[in-house]
Amino acid sequence: MRRQPRPRASVLAALRWFVVSYGLAVTGYVAINAMVSRWLGLDGFADFVIILTVATGLGQLALVGVHRGGLREAAKLTESPDAEVLATLRAGVQVAARGTLPAVGVLSGAVVYAVVGGNEVERILLGVSCALLVVLNGLQKLWANYLRGFGEIRLAGLLEGRSGGGLVSLCQAVAVLVIWVAFPGTGLVGALGALIIGFTLPVLYGGHRVNLRWGHVQFESHFISDLRTTVAANWRFAVNHLGAFLGTNIELWLAGLLLASSQASLFSAAQRIALLLVIPLISAQVVFAPVCARLLATGEIRRLQSVLRTGATVALLVSAVLLTPILLAPDRVVALVFGDTFEGAALPLLILSISSVANVATGLSGIALTMSHREGVAAAIQAATVVAQVVVGVAAALVWGLNGLAVSATTFVTLNYVGQWIAVRRLLGLWTQPTFRPRFGDLRRAEG
């Protein structure tokens, strides 16, 4: 029997759940970083973060934009969607899940095996771990975005967010603790294996829930034709999200290439905490991306501005809770999370926090661009800033080291967010920044 979709909850109801999901996600996120930093120490923590972020970026790129394009189209569906539309969405998922994603996973695993040092068994395990992380990261984002579009906000929020989603991050934290205690000698391989274990069950369940939506639809797969159609429709999403991901992580990879391992680990630690400040805003996209697509489709621009600015205000208030201890005692925050050996990350943390605050202060401008079919504009802004980040970041790291790299990162990441904020104003006539007059009534009336 065909499963009937649940009615969509209001944005306000979804935001209440977002606060719960956010709390779970941050708890798991902090626990993972705290344990792995103590497990691997200053010499190994940067390697863990670099491999994880590269796998995440490759997994996102391998989706060729299907996850965001699918979210936008799924959000426009009625409670009785047309079978042809569902078949088109399903074709895009097949292209990514059975084609591009496994291919990129295998390729990345082979590259890791070829370039890393160590004995043969360790090289094989690291290659396999990287391949699996690419595939699982991609599937996580794929299922979560479709669930958002279909209105299953709670499960989407638990499955995926900046931290990995509350459910995933807590499962991973438990797995890291068990393997750290039981097999401490496994080191980097053990830490990556724990993440894979924590990913598996939530990702499988997310895929099951998505497939319930179109299991009744007759579907004929023509991979090459579907691939061409899918890439043509969604490639701008892929470029846009790759640019956003590079903008966040490029300095981390530069630190791994140009700085000593201990300095790279300090930069990684500072970045991990600074990212906590933007989790509220990025996690709020779980709620606001589908509602943004629907309000843009119906031309309700004034209402959309109210919804976006109120959502940005909520995210800013939550971020302020975490920002306060970082401003007052950054050294104690770093020592509490990563241990006393990481206290040198305090100043880079303060510097990187500026760009995180700029992200929150400009609101959901990126979502407004992508959901309004202007993802190419966002991609162009991000590409320009990423090029500047690489050129200036290399010089800053070589001349001024750890702190110079942090200043470079903050400068250009901030310019990226401000540029998107200005573009939304000029192209859509919308303001997206937080407001002193939030309208929670609009959130209550809007479908999430």
Image (cartoon, rainbow, N blue to C red):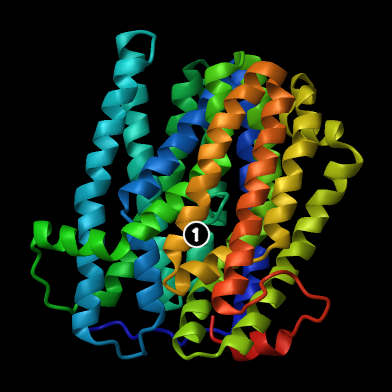
Q: Is residue 299 above or below residue 51?
A: below
In the picture of the structure, the residue carrying the numbered disc 1 is 378
Query: Count the marks: how many?
Result: 1
Q: Is residue 104 above or below residue 42?
A: below
- Residue at the extreme front of the image, as rendered: 426
| Residue 139 locus on image (x, y percent) | 35, 53
| Residue 343 locus on image (x, y percent) | 80, 24
- Find numbered disc 1 in the image and state the secondary structure of the residue it sits on: helix
Q: Residue at x 36, y 31 (%)?
A: 129
Q: Quadrant of residue 397?
A: top right
| Residue 351 locus on image (x, y percent) | 77, 37
Q: Quadrant of residue 45?
A: top right
Q: Residue at x 48, y 65 (%)?
A: 156
295 or 93, nearer to the observer: 295
* Crowding near the residue tagged with mark 1, few <14, some 14–19, many ≥20 C-alpha atoms within 10 Å: many
| Left or right: residue 146 compared with residue 99 | right
| Left or right: residue 399 compared with residue 133 | right
Q: Amino acid at mark 1?
A: Ala
- Residue at the extreme top of the image, as rendered: 119
